[in-house]
Amino acid sequence: MKIQFEFSDDLILTAHGGLSVVGALLEASRVFSELNRIRLRENEHPTFSHTDVVKSYVGMLCQGKSDFDYLETVRDDDTFRLCLNLNHVPSSPTVRQRLDEAAASNLEKWNDILIRTGLELIQRVHAPLTGVKVGNKTYIPLDIDVSPFDNSGTKKEGVSRTYKGVDGYAPIFAYLGQEGYGVHVELREGSTHVQKDTADFLAASILYARIVTQKDLLVRMDAGHDSLENLRVCQAHKVDYIIKVNLRRTNEEEWLEYAQTYGTCTEPREGKKEYIGVREVEKPGFSSPLRQVFHVIHRTMDRHGQILLVPDIEVNVYWTSLEGDPWRVVELYREHATSEQFHSEIKSDLDLERLPSGKFRTNDLVLHLGLLAYNLLRIIGQKSLRLGGAPLRKHVHRRRIKSVIQNMITIAVRVVRHARRLKFVFGKHSPWAGVVSRLYAAFVT
């Protein structure tokens, strides 16, 4: 049977019905309207409002499209405008120029508003925020890490050699809770040392996290951030921490001898012994000794039973303020690796690894817009788990951003106007229709 193609002037279909949920979320924010009160030196009386420009671009990001030119595909799409409650959909040159102007004159203010918008929405809609148990206490993890963006083959401002051996940027991110909500981000040149200005970033991240929750925070950072300056920030803000020690010139044999003397030994299998323990270290500028958890692994045989000619010694040491079982400290630090998944979602699912502008400050603003889009999609994904009714039977604790875009944002609907009302009509076999409609009802004000 051959398929015939027809085009109708009466039938209105859209492939992004789920943007109505994004629009409802943005309308619920009290912070977002602050953008329109900002005056730009180069454009004091713009034709298109700042919120129209930002919402339009965030709407594209929420579909996994970061290139400015994608906006041309929705210029004449009334449904896109109605979903995001826009007065007008600006052209791609208008959006590019407005972001350039904002980045040149008011970057810090715009970035702060975008971050606070996402965090206010997390708190306002009571988005799920899951902590970790340590003894009888529950902590909300605050994971901070650098993730290089590969922008090789470009001449963008600020692109330079990263520690991963590629040309690009080296932005630093802060994520809150096991869900991984983004609480702070900062774009950096690729060659920037991971610890440069990180203490200030850490302090700001803690303050941003307090917008969402007043519960106990647990800062987790890798060995690149092994600095007493970070420990001082944590103590000053009264938050607990686990920061891996950078064993720059470590003698593994000496650590093994120390662990055998002062640590507790377990033997999970033949040829592998693990030693774990705690020691206290005096450091200048601290009123009391700092606590370190050490974990030393001694292997004389590999997992396949092959005896090693030279025994393998692996040493891991962590600064921590947590008391109690040192094994729990090791487990909690290993869970810090989940933040790599969050990096991946921003880079690939939102298509932000190769940032769209040639200007460094504009790309910094774009990355903050991406963090807002990421938080909007994360809120939608996590709330959908609470509402139930999803067609997927597999039990998950966190929906990937890509799944949210595919299943709930780019959902096909028929647009019907009748009696001054707008209706979205889902297909008979649309599996996610019920979830999207309940989400919209939950967020609309």
Image (cartoon, helix red, strand yellow):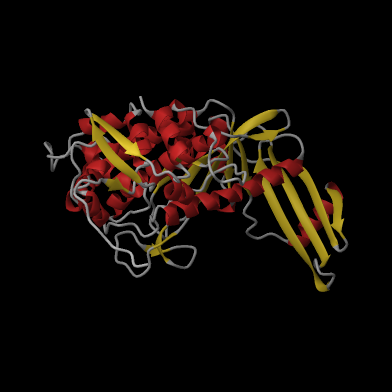
Residue drawn where x is 29% and y is 60% of the image? 157
Coordinates of residue 325 in the picture (x, y in percent): 77, 38
Write down the quadrant of residue 51 in the picture.
Answer: top left
Instruction: Identify which residue, 372 or 86, lies in the foreground.
Output: 86
Q: How many marks?
A: 0
Residue drawn where x is 68% and y is 40% of the image? 282
Q: From the viewer's perspective, is residue 154 above or below residue 223? A: below
Residue at the farthest front position: 1
Coordinates of residue 138 in the picture (x, y in percent): 65, 30
Instruction: Identify which residue, 274 or 255, lies in the foreground.
Output: 274
Q: From the viewer's perspective, is residue 252 above or below residue 94? A: below
Residue at the farthest bottom position: 309
Instruction: Identify which residue, 160 or 416, lies in the foreground.
Output: 416
Position of 399 with respect to 138 (left or right) is left
Q: From the viewer's perspective, is residue 17 above or below residue 206? A: below
Coordinates of residue 65 in the picture (x, y in percent): 34, 54
Instruction: Identify which residue, 165 or 89, lies in the foreground.
Output: 89
Position of 246 with respect to 402 (left or right) is right
Q: Is residue 195 visible?
A: no
Write down the quadrant of residue 83 in the picture.
Answer: top left
Residue drawn where x is 55% and y is 53% of the image? 224
Position of 242 with respect to 72 (left or right) is right
Q: From the viewer's perspective, is residue 168 above or below residue 244? A: below
Image quarter in which the C terminus is found:
top left
